[in-house]
Amino acid sequence: MSMIELTVNQRAVQAVAEPRTNLADFVRDKLDLTGTHLGCEHGVCGACTVLLDGVPARSCITYAVACEGAEVTTIEGLDEDAVTSELRAAFTREHALQCGYCTPGMLVSARDLVLRLPEADERAIRVGLSGNLCRCTGYVGIVRAVQSVIEARRARDIAPEPGGERKILGPVGSGRTVRTGADKAERISPASSKQASTEALSSVDAFPDFTPAAVLTQQFSVAHSPEQVFAMFGDIAAVASCLPGASLTAPPNPERVEGAIRVRLGPIAATFSGLARVERNAADMSGRIVGIGNDQRSRSSTQGEIRYRLVPIEQGAATRVDLSIGYTLTGMLAQVGRPGLVRDLAARLIAEFAANLDRRLSGTSPAAPADLSGMSLVSGLLRARITRWFTRFSSRKDGAA
């Protein structure tokens, strides 16, 4: 994993990415900028076109780590751009879009032509857009739209920019300031280097907000007052000791918690090392934990947040803990992280956490810490599902009789 810093839509971004992650996946998965579309993923169709240092580039064949220090503009970053606004209106007027899948990349490329071409020459426009494929329109409306914008701007005495926004000859992005070769080698060190990954995560001093790919809601109850539970949740080390597979790797504080969680699912073993920040609100006894982590062996990464609220029950003698768990998982483990399975595993994990929490609040020691074993969780899950299947089968059989 590598920590990269770049500017996306005029906003400074710092995030962890695998060396093999392309720029399209980076802006879509890490930054939730899904206006950048993926089509062929071979740099042919142009649906993924973005601006890299002001120049159109195929983001599906551009590595994110190669964009260190660059300025990236996606279609979302052109909302207030004057040329793009004119093009959007012209695309609508000339019926230049149907399904719209190619449109973001088409607009980015068309904007470059509007800036550079001295006149609305149809052949030059068709050549300039030849790297953006559309399976719907036949291109006639698209070409007319671009022509109309060029003609209107030239009629208003807006001169063309022969180089567009290009600052230097050479490959896209070659004009930006880069670090030394040694620094570059360090940035794109192999993902198998645990030390590099740890250093990258350790350098994170802010946890950007994100939109979780999945959100789970759970709740459990403990026979202790909300005040006791809230005080317990303020002891980070104590909470970690109640969570199966979790451990702290440095002295914790609310602004920065360094730790790891070990997971084993049959032959798959993973250790997610990461960082978290803890937020608490004593007024309504709620809190939030947000963090990031990665596993070197499976080359998987995750971002997540846990929101909790303590609700008094039994006249304040007991507490119901309402949880909202949001997460995004990428890499090999994402292939086995089916939402239904994750939901059931989370329920079993929370049940173990609740039991350990109750033991600690009662003055007894939690169960001995162990890896989060998927086999023990899955066995219970399978038993529950088999029971449900037999129940459904029996009910259908009785109904048929």
Image (cartoon, rainbow, N blue to C red):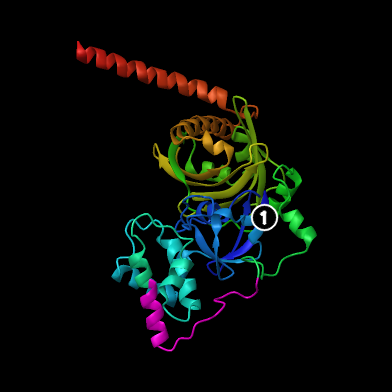
In x, y percent, where is residue 365? 63, 29
Relative to the observer, which residue lies in front, 389 or 113? 113
Q: Residue at x 55, y 22 (%)?
A: 376
Relative to the observer, which residue lies in front, 224 or 235? 235
Query: Which stretch is magenta?
Result: 146-169
In x, y percent, where is residue 174? 66, 67
- The local secondary structure at tag 1 comes to strand
Q: Amino acid at mark 1?
A: Met
Can you name the residue that lies furthest to the front here? 123
Q: Residue at x 62, y 51 (%)?
A: 17
Q: Decide if residue 315 is on the left or right side of residue 228.
A: left
Q: Alpha-carbon neighbours of circle 1 within 10 Å: few (<14), some, or many (≥20)? A: many
Q: Quadrant of the C terminus?
A: top left
Q: Quick check: 274 above or below 389? A: below
In x, y percent, where is residue 47? 46, 57
Q: Quadrant of residue 104 in the image?
A: bottom left
Relative to the observer, which residue lies in front, 239 or 25? 25
Q: Quick check: 393 above or below 177? A: above
Q: Which residue is mark 1?
A: 3
Viewer can see residue 317: no
Relative to the observer, which residue lies in front, 21 or 271? 21
Can you name the residue that lies furthest to the right here? 182
Q: Is residue 153 magenta?
A: yes
Can you name the residue that lies furthest to the bottom here? 157
Q: Decide if residue 354 is on the left or right side of residue 390.
A: right
Q: Quick check: 192 above or below 79? A: above
Viewer can see residue 373: yes
Q: Is residue 362 magenta?
A: no
